[in-house]
Image (cartoon, helix red, strand yellow):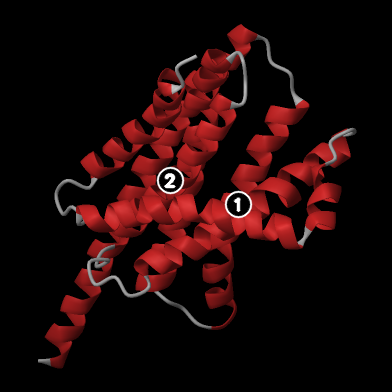
Amino acid sequence: MNEMPKILSAVLPGFLLLAYILWTDRKNPEPWLLIMKGVMCGIISIGILRLFWRYMPDYFAWAAVQDTIVEKVRSAFLHAAIPEEMAKLIMLWVVVSRNTFYDEPRDGIVYAVSVGLGFATLENIGYVLGYENWGEVALVRAVLSVPAHYLCAVLMGYYYANARFWPTRGVKRFWQLIRIILIPVLIHGTFDCLASVIHWNTTALYVLAFFFLILVGWIHHHCNQLSDKQSSDAMKRLQIELQKGE
């Protein structure tokens, strides 16, 4: 059977979400080459995971067991959420560490999403090609799994920008840094727990997907608003300090 419809169905959700994130950043867009770099780094992050799997086989074999509810929760966080989000965070750092175009907080969300969708799209291709009922798998992952990666990326990018543009000190600085990975891991792990522990019927699944997509869009919009407000407040404080200096 021709594999092209399967691949297209796996790639389309990531492409649409990437188009959406770029549309929200249209007033001060990032260079296309850097966006593509982010996507490629997201794809490469799966290679980092494979290195983990190769050199830590006993750990991943232990974490993957899902016979009981406790083991399913353990697998959701230790086998999936933590290593995947760590791999994506490493690649986000690669994309933005010396990026002179990363000059406003919103950009952190854009670059993190490009990395997250690169990861999600390659993962999606693997899942869709691996099942005979690929159409159903592609649809469910399009409305749940890929948006979940998108949501984790939005939050990672938002907190990364907070730590970069408004650094604090002491315990507050530690919290600034740790939540870059902690919040996405909690979201990712909780999502996987629900997916593995709760068996939804078809109607409930798509009702859940509908409200989940609304939630993802709202959180993205809220993070953008918070970033803009923080930027505006920082600019006002700078202007006040300059006026005092005069």
Q: In this view, does 32 lie above or below 241?
A: above
Q: Within 10 Å of the Cα at label 2, are there few (<14), some (14-19), or many (20+) other Cα atoms?
A: many
| Percent x, y of residue 235 | 21, 70
In this rendered view, identify the residue nearer to me: 20 or 46.
46
> At 62% across and 21% down in the image, what residue appears?
131
Report if residue 155 is visible in the image: no
Q: In which quarter of the image is residue 243?
A: bottom left
| Percent x, y of residue 195 | 68, 29
Judged from this view, the residue extending furthest toward the front is: 1
Mark seen at residue 84: 1
> Which part of the image, by quadrant, shows the C terminus?
bottom left
In the rendered structure, the answer to whether residue 224 lies left or right of residue 27 reads right
Q: Is residue 112 above or below residue 239?
A: above
Kind of residue at disc 2: Gly
| Percent x, y of residue 60 | 78, 51
In this rendered view, identify the residue nearer to me: 41 or 236.
41
> At 70% across and 30% down in the image, what residue appears?
194
CA–CA distance between discs 2 and 1? 12 Å
Judged from this view, the residue extending furthest toward the bottom is: 245
> At 58% across and 75% down in the image, what residue appears?
174
Mark toward the start of the polypeptide (2 vs 1) = 1
Q: Quadrant of residue 107?
A: bottom left
- What is the number of callouts on the image? 2
In this rendered view, identify the residue nearer to me: 152 or 174.
152
In the rendered structure, the answer to whether residue 174 lies left or right of residue 95 reads right
Q: In this view, does 231 lie above or below 70?
A: below
Q: Within 10 Å of the Cα at label 1, are there few (<14), some (14-19), or many (20+) other Cα atoms?
A: many
Query: Which residue is tagged 2?
Result: 118
Kind of residue at disc 1: Glu
Task: Classify mark 2: helix, strand or loop.
Answer: helix
